[in-house]
Image (tube, grey):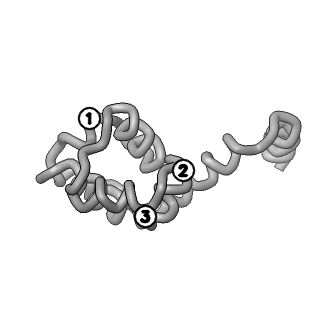
Amino acid sequence: MNIGKKIKSIREAKGMTAKQVISAVDMGAPMYSRIENGVNEPSLTTLEKIGKALGVKLSDFFNSDDNLADVNSYDASIMEKINLLKNLMMKKRKLFFLWWMLW
């Protein structure tokens, strides 16, 4: 399996759209599409960014498909929330965690 197919397979297994990954990676849609379709090969840096957006390790792109059975849309939902928290300003982040601890 080529790397583009593997990326798409992991993304779909996590219930994520290409648009969500593109947004997290800050990449143009045409370039991401070319990577997923196997037209272009991603650089190591790009592959690391895609892995981070998908919540997987770099090595997961080179493992067999058997590991995808443990991934679900709940994992994707958690990753989306984590990414939202990362993008909050520090003051808002502190307020959120204070609220979370009191809840």
Q: Nearer the viewer, mark 3 or mark 1?
A: 3
Task: Report x, y in % for residue 5.
Answer: 21, 58
Where disc 2 sits, the SS reads helix
What residue is at 55 percent from the left and 55 percent from the top?
23
What residue is at 30 percent from the left and 42 percent from the top?
42
Is residue 16 visible in the rendered structure shown here? Answer: no
Task: Report x, y in % for residue 95.
Answer: 87, 41
Q: Specify the quadrant of the image occupied by residue 56.
A: top left
1 and 2 marks in contact (CB < 8 Å)? no
Count neighbours of disc 1 (C-alpha within 10 A) and say few if under 14, some if 14 to 19, many if 20 or more.
Answer: few
Task: Report x, y in % for residue 4.
Answer: 24, 54
Q: Which mark is residue 24?
A: 2
Tell me which amino acid carries mark 1: Ser
3 and 1 marks in contact (CB < 8 Å)? no
What residue is at 15 percent from the left and 51 percent from the top?
2
**Disc 1 target residue:** 59
Tell me which amino acid carries mark 3: Ala
Q: Which mark is residue 22?
A: none
2 and 3 marks in contact (CB < 8 Å)? no
Q: Specify the quadrant of the image occupied by residue 93.
A: top right
Q: Specify the quadrant of the image occupied by residue 43.
A: top left
Q: CA distance from mark 3 to mark 1?
A: 21 Å
Where disc 3 sits, the SS reads helix
Tell me which amino acid carries mark 2: Ala
Q: CA distance from mark 1 to mark 2?
A: 20 Å
**Disc 3 target residue:** 18
95 vs 37: above or below: above
What residue is at 51 percent from the left and 61 percent from the top?
20
